[in-house]
Image: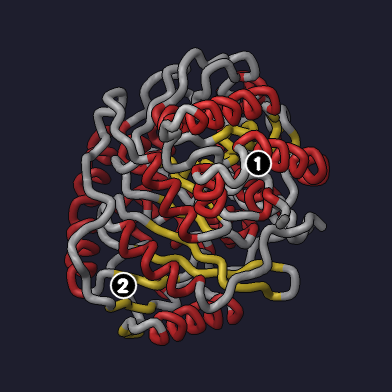
Amino acid sequence: MTDLWRLSATDLAARISRREVSAREVAQAALARMEAVNPRLNAVVMPDPEGALNAAAAVDAVLARGGDPGPMAGVPVTIKVNVDQGGWPTTNGLRLQKDLLAYQDSPVVANLKRAGAVILGRTNTPAFSLRWFTRNSLHGATRNPRDPSITPGGSSGGAAAAVAAGIGAVAHGTDIAGSIRYPAYACGVHGLRPTPGRVPAWNSSGPDRGIGAQITAVSGPLARHVADLRLALKAMSTADARDPWWVPAPLEGPRFPRRATLCVAPDGMPVAPEVEAALRDAAQRLRAAGWTVQEVSGLPPLRESAALQMLLWLAETRRGGGAAMMEREGDPDAIAVYGFMERLTPNPDLAGFQDALQKRLGLLREWLGFLEGSPLVLMPASGALPFPDHADVAGFEAFQAIAEAQLPQVGLPMLGLPGLVVSTGLVGTVPVGVQLVASRYREDVLLAAAEAIEAGGVPPMPVEPA
């Protein structure tokens, strides 16, 4: 039999539901894979073998009674350490929060459990979930399973590294400035940032977030197969009254014309030749699948949206004593990156903060109008191939260059639009891929296009860690 840990979430759920294999057998295979490769990666920093086996046994018991354990019956998943999971600390990569025990599951964790998923453990993030790299003073550094010299991405670097290496079929991640999409890109898997309001969110272990984070931060899935993103999104999106922002939008919208717009260099950003080649290859794959693809030199503004995103996020962090909090934690990476971000971002007064929210509306109107004519945008995930690990703390100029390359990651959240990164291949040992963007609550458009691109070939996965 094929190693069970290699199989997709959709395949595993079907086999378990038909009782061709037990959820316990699948959990044991996933735990054995985690034990074999996680010491080389440090992706899962809080393993839970006992909890996983108990959850698998519960799935098998439901099936034995003739019941339905849910659409993700027995599928092994991981959870990021910055969301509440009852009985576990919500560390967010911080020594300050190593004992911050959650007493109830966040909505996304509760939804995955209700869908029958089996949680293997909790995955690593940088301190404060702040970087596109994954290292902190509490849990240590996560390594990229494809090439340890490059970043696994961040902040969901542990999630992406785990799923790329076969530790679980689906990984939970969060995204406020690329934290799902960029780790997927860096580790050579797929990652979906849903529309805000699609997946309910709330951490009872901490205070409610500021308005900037409320309108930009999301939870979403990373996986080795686009079909698994579709399965996980459905499970994650179930209603939960604890999140007033949750929206009862259908997962399948009205029929749409298969038209896409390709933009190689949004807002004139620098783009590496390998990234441009991946974009043109993805466009050709879409055309082969029956899509019409038109190339344009520019899109509605992205750079201004990215600047507003940083302004709002830093204004709220500063209001909460951000610099003092960084100093208390004492994580050198977080201190350096936060200092660089402060140098790049002005501190607004109340009027400036209100102006930023007002400008957001106009930018979103432009983008929604554009997407009326072209339901899909194909753009870079990043302007560069995945960065050398920890390149962002080499100095201010290095951080500036990285921030410029990450314009497609930072510009999207302020617009409230969904995005999906599809991995399309390798440049040597380094992954490359593309980003897809659609209108609000049109994740179905993204998934349809991603499946067409995926059919043209992806890097080998799961991967044996280097």
What separation in Å lies between label 1 and label 2 (alpha carbons)? 45 Å
Q: Position of residue 60 (x, y in %)?
A: 56, 31
Graded by Cα atoms within 10 Å as few (under 14), some (14 to 19) or many (20 or more), the crowding at tag 2 reads some
Pointer 2: what residue? 299
Depth check, mark 1 against mark 2: the one in front is 1
**Percent x, y of residue 159:** 60, 44
Tell me the element at label 2. Answer: loop
- Report whether 284 appears left or right of 21: left
Residue 179: x %, y % from top left: 52, 47
**Residue 245 image-quadrant placement:** top left
Q: Residue at x 75, y 44 (%)?
A: 33
Residue pointed to by mark 1: 26
Residue located 70% across and 68% down the image = 430
- Along the viewing direction, whichever of 384 and 438 lies nearer the viewer: 438
Tag 2: amino acid = Leu
Q: Is residue 444 visible?
A: yes
Compared with residue 325, is residue 284 higher up or lower down, i.e. above or below? below
**Is any atom of residue 212 visible in this view?**
no
